[in-house]
Structure formats: structure tokens, C-alpha cells
Image (cartoon, rainbow, N blue to C red):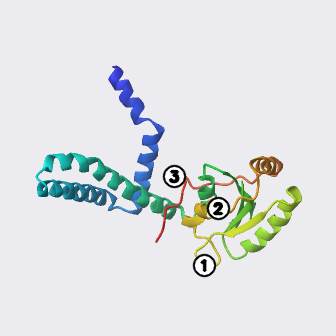
Amino acid sequence: MFKRKAKEKKIKSPRFQTFRDAYKVTKSVKPWISIALIAIFLVTWAIGIAIGFAVDHPVYFGFIFLPLSLLTSLLFFTRQAGTAAYSSIEGQMGAGASVLMAIRKGWTTTPAVAVAKNQDMVHRSVGRAGIVLTGEGSNAVNQMLNEERKKTERFAPGVPIALVVVGDENGKVPLRKLQKHLQRMPKKLTAHQMREVRARLKAVGGLSMPIPKGPMPTRAPKIR
């Protein structure tokens, strides 16, 4: 009875749920992921066993390379899950907000502080780098960003404000690189100043809007 309860608790753990959700998303975008993971595991393990035969210790090297094979497969899956997560929400309304809100440390994001009829929108993030206004949508979102900057300056005068537009064109930040772009911005506020800015802007709020759901990496993967 105790073992059954422990097993049920383990299956329902948040970490297992997150991994399962990530696998489902990755599988839907990249149907070949299962075969690739098995192949990487077997090839890595086979290399270890082959080295073992070469030095006359196949069992020892097979044992050593077993966790290494699992780790290699996991690292590959993590990378693929990251790109799949972005692909699954790219083009959806509020995709930028979903990525920004997945940054767990150092930033707080208020989605949709401004929304146009054509679904262009602006999100506001506050961190040690100051205030970042992120726009996603058509080219008209640039005007929305400028208007929102003027509005934000009234509530937080003197605070650095950066404008970001999500997109793959020149001068824009691709969705898959959005988290990394914010995390690499130089710090201009102290922790105390950042909390004050958050408190000032908390009353401004945002609009109610749907946010794409699904596992989202807290750190953008490296894209070559």
C-alpha cells in the first residue's frame, strides 16, 4: 500500500508533469524525437562498450557509459524541447508574453499593457536593466511602443526604458532569443530601485488576454 502511494506521488510530481508536457509538445513538432533519443543513447553506449573491448574491460566501460548515454540523450532532448516550445507558440497571439513570463528570475512581466484591434500588442517587463516594452505584431506596433513609452515615463520618470520588437527581420528580436536578449541587458537599477519601479507600475496593470499554454524554457536555447 505504501509503495503504491509513493509511486502515485512520484508520477504526479511537478517535475514529471513538466517533462511529460515537454515531451508531448516536442513530439507534436518533431515526430522523430523518440527514435532520435533511442539512437543517441544506443550509439553512445555502444561507443563506450567498444572502448571497453579495446582495453579488455567491456563490462566496466559499459557500466561507466550507461549514465553518460542517458545524459547525452537528455541534453539532446532539452535542446530539441526548447526549439519545439518556441515553434509551437510562434505566430500565436500573446506568444511574446508567454516567453517573457517564463523568465523566472530577475524579471516580472505584465502582458498586454496595450492592444490594438489587429492584435498588435505591447508587454511591459521590469528588471534590473529598467523597463522593457516589447511589441509583437505588425509594423504599426512601433507607434504603440512609442505611445506606451510616453505613458510609462509619467509613472516612472528617470527610469531607463528600452523598446523591443519581436520578429525575424533586421532590427527585431526573434521569439526564440527574446529571453536571452533581456537577460543580457546591462543592469542599471539597484534591487531597491527595481522594487520601487514595480510598485509604481503595479497600479497601471494590463489587459486580460489569452496566453499560449505549454512548457516554455526559462532560458532560450543556443541557436546556431
| Percent x, y of residue 129 | 72, 59
The secondary structure type at the circle numbered 3 is: loop
| Percent x, y of residue 220 | 53, 60
Q: Is residue 169 above or below residue 120?
A: below
Residue name at image x 40 percent, y 52 percent = 23
Q: Is residue 155 left or right of residue 29?
A: right
| Measured Cα–Cα span from mark 3 to mark 1 | 26 Å
Of residues 137 and 59, the one nearer the viewer is 59
| Measured Cα–Cα span from mark 2 to mark 3 | 21 Å
| Measured Cα–Cα span from mark 1 to mark 2 | 18 Å
Of residues 147 and 70, the one nearer the viewer is 70
The secondary structure type at the circle numbered 1 is: loop
Q: Quadrant of residue 165?
A: bottom right
| Percent x, y of residue 79 | 43, 60
Of residues 100 and 143, the one nearer the viewer is 100
Residue name at image x 15 percent, y 58 percent = 50
Q: Is residue 130 visible?
A: yes
Of residues 45 and 152, the one nearer the viewer is 45
Q: Residues within 10 Å of mark 2 (few under 14, many from 20)?
A: many
Q: Which residue is mark 3?
A: 214
Q: Is residue 161 above or below residue 207?
A: below
Q: Which residue is mark 2?
A: 182
Mark 3 is on which residue type?
Answer: Gly
Q: Quadrant of residue 179?
A: bottom right
Residue name at image x 45 percent, y 61 percent = 84
* Mark 3 or 1, closer to the camera: 1
Mark 2 is on which residue type?
Answer: Leu
Q: Please report whichever mark, 3 or 1, sits nearer to the chain's N-terminal start.
A: 1
Q: Which residue is mark 1?
A: 169
Q: Please report whichever mark, 1 or 2, sits nearer to the chain's N-terminal start.
A: 1
